[in-house]
Image: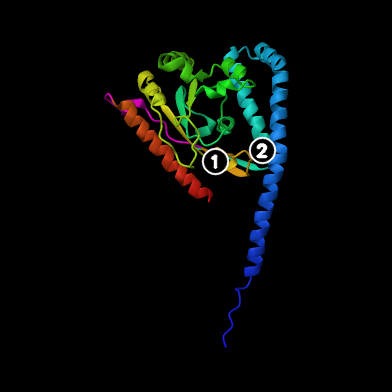
Amino acid sequence: MTRIFPAAGADTHKKRGRWSVGMSAVATVLMNLFIYPLIVALTVTGIVLFPILYALWRTVVRWDKGRIMRHFVWIYGRSWMGIVSPFVRFKREGFRNNRIDLPCIIVVNHFSFFDTYCMALLPFSDVTFALRSWPFKMLWYAPFMRLAGYLDLETIGWEGTLEVSSRVFSKKGTILFFPEGHRSKDGKIQRFHSGPFKLAVETGVPILPLSMTGTDVLLPPHRWWLKPATICLRALPLVSPGAFTGETAHVEMRKYVQRMIAENFEQMRSEAN
């Protein structure tokens, strides 16, 4: 009579699998017990110390108020990265010598509330965010967002966006858009809005596409607890508006950039798995 036995090491493999799952659950619990209180403490400390730090920065670097505030936002994001680093791994790819050509319009996919924090992965701090109105309704952030010169797109409209963006570009600055307009709820890249691409065609400023993975694992929409993740931000080749012509140039540019980001996103996700 033939007897079939489990392959050698099968029980050990199962035990290791259960151990891995158990450790992941413990890490998730610890992450949520500590990270949220530390983020609140970081935010409150930053607000309290802001007047002193702002006065010090104005004296030392002599930047305008908007640039100082954008630098503070970048430092806040880097501090957040430090807080979550025991549970989150960060990677940055595609940035040549940690620099990019300026001015440019950055577009990046949107999966999580913490996507804005992850923009501290950028190798420079002078980034002007262009956002929908709802973030400006958060009382603890709104004054600093306005001081930073961020664009409230729904309030200022197209003409206001074009005017403010032109001033930013004249100073070799950068405008950052989440072209989906909202966080993806199904883990897929959503349809892009035309705003940043129309702006590129109107001003002649190139688009820098960024593809980001991992924030959909960290904190997707409709979930309040954090999970350990690996977050990767990849810079793709600059896209010049001069490569697109005609009345639908911005539409063709939008489709091209969306395809670039979506293809890289899927590639990055498969590499992570």
Find residue 151 and report its horizontal and vertical position in percent: 50, 19
Q: Nearer the viewer, residue 211 or 27?
A: 27
Dot 2, crowdedness within 10 Å: few (<14), some or many (≥20)? many
Element type at marker 1? helix
Q: Is residue 249 visible?
A: yes
Q: How is the image coloured?
A: rainbow
Q: Residue furthest left?
A: 246
The amino acid on which the numbered mark 2 sits, given as a three-letter code, is Val
Find residue 266 and report its horizontal and vertical position in percent: 45, 45
Q: Earlier in the sequence, mark 1 or mark 2?
A: 2
The amino acid on which the numbered mark 1 sits, given as a three-letter code, is Asp
- Name the residue carrying label 2: 84
What stretch of residues is rendered in magenta?
234-247
Find residue 189 and report its horizontal and vertical position in percent: 44, 39
* Residue pictured at 31% horizontal, 26% vertical: 249
- Name the residue carrying label 1: 216
* Residue pictured at 68% horizontal, 54% vertical: 22
Element type at marker 2? helix
Q: Does the magenta-highlighted stretch encompass residue 244?
A: yes
Q: Nearer the viewer, residue 130 or 102?
A: 130
Q: Does the magenta-highlighted stretch encompass residue 158?
A: no
Dot 1, crowdedness within 10 Å: few (<14), some or many (≥20)? many
Q: CA distance from mark 1 to mark 2?
A: 15 Å
- The secondary structure making up most of the magenta span is loop
User: Horizontally, is 239 left or right of 56 in the view?
Assistant: left
Instruction: Determine whether label 1 and label 2 are within 8 Å by CB.
Output: no
Q: Is residue 161 visible?
A: no
Q: Quadrant of residue 157?
A: top left
Q: Quadrant of residue 10?
A: bottom right
Find residue 219 and report its horizontal and vertical position in percent: 59, 39
